[in-house]
Amino acid sequence: MVFSPSTAAPLGAVTWNMGGAMGHQRRDQPVGGVLAFDVGGANLKAADGRGRVHAETFELWRRSDELADRLTAIAAAWRPGRIVATMTGEIADCYPDRPAGVASIVAALQTAASAVEAELGIYLVDGRLVAPEIAIADPLAAAASNWHVLARLAAAVAECDRGLLVDVGSTTTDILRFDQRRPLPLATDDAGRMASGELVYTGIERTPLAALVRSLPLAGCRRPLAAELYARAQDAWLLLGGLPENAASGDTADGRPATREGARGRLAHQMLLEPAAVSLDQATRAAERPAAVQVRLVARAIRRVLAREGRAPERVVLSGHGTMLATRALEQAGVSAPVICLEERLGGAISRAAPAHALALVALGELR
């Protein structure tokens, strides 16, 4: 797989064509097809169900007034005949409540669809694609719906009666049981899913380090952490090799490169030390502690979800880009079922944008 930054996207955005040539479609490519959006609070993702995906950092809580323009720009480059969307961004604190968030996101999608003369469908947590007016009238059914369509993809890939999906994303982790036909959630809303263990509010990138631990081991002692956002889980996993370095990305706690050296400096800052006071080896050893806390959180949730079934899963599907975290958590939870990694099955780009890819397949009639 080859990838390169898209020329029509802002810094940090990447478009992949899994079949070979990179960037947005050439002008001689046919108009039509499906464009599926996954509108999150921190990222925008898109897919066409044919191997082409797009992902970019988009801090919705800071840039909600720019959402329609970004969606329109992506849609104009892809030129679909139909746009479909799922979302989790409605919980961003730029909105007073979920209904307002859903209405605002749907309005932005309507602007994009109108600009390219495409039909628009919104995905609900019951698995239906509906007209935007229906989604606005029933906002809690449209809110936080991307996990449901992802579990449908997991069921299709696993082909078993008792499956488990573990999706570790940048901000949250989803843990869901499924059978051969459908997801088997205990709850469909964020609060209910978090209470059941099916939603864990910890992720491979955006979780603040100070939300995980109060101190870090350094030179034989425990160094307390400032209650500030100086470092994130991303830094721990960069140091441990669970995330690839990306010197071109400034999507970090301090806006500096997402590299191991950058992570070392951010960990030092979190302890209110100068970067020179913490070696790369010391930072890497210190990173094991917050990583272990995240592994315990996810492992505990896996055990809770599986305990209600009373039987071990036949297969586990891993999604997202937190594979190292998920693998460690499964081992700690004692899950020994065969693992299907979407990153290996579909490629890293599609795995990271898996809900958008799954939604495109639903719209194409290729995923039940």
Image (cartoon, rainbow, N blue to C red):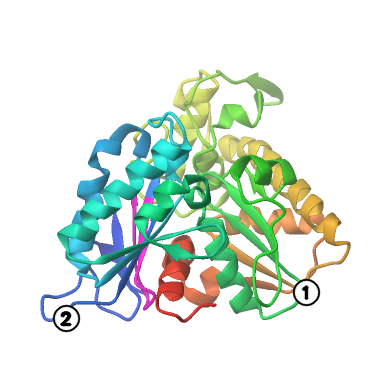
Query: Magenta stretch: dominant SS?
Result: strand
| Amino acid at the residue labelled 2 | Gln
Question: Measuring 78% from the left and 74% from the top, which residue is drawn there?
Answer: 314
Q: Earlier in the sequence, mark 1 or mark 2?
A: 2
Q: Which mark is residue 29?
A: 2
Question: Measuring 60% from the left and 50% from the top, which residue is drawn there?
Answer: 173
Answer left or right for 21 relative to 275. left
| Amino acid at the residue labelled 1 | Glu
Residue 306: quarter of image: bottom right
Asked if residue 179 is positioned above or below residue 199 in the image, the reply reads below
Q: Which mark is residue 43?
A: none
Question: Measuring 51% from the left and 49% from the top, which residue is drawn there?
Answer: 144
- Magenta segment range? 44-58
Answer left or right for 36 relative to 154. left
Magenta residue check for 56: yes
The residue that mark 1 highlights is: 314
Residue 100 percent across, percent down from the top left: 40, 36
Mark 2 crowdedness (10 Å alpha carbons): few <14, some 14-19, many ≥20? few
Residue 95: quarter of image: top left
Q: Give whichever of 260, 97 is nearer the camera.
A: 97
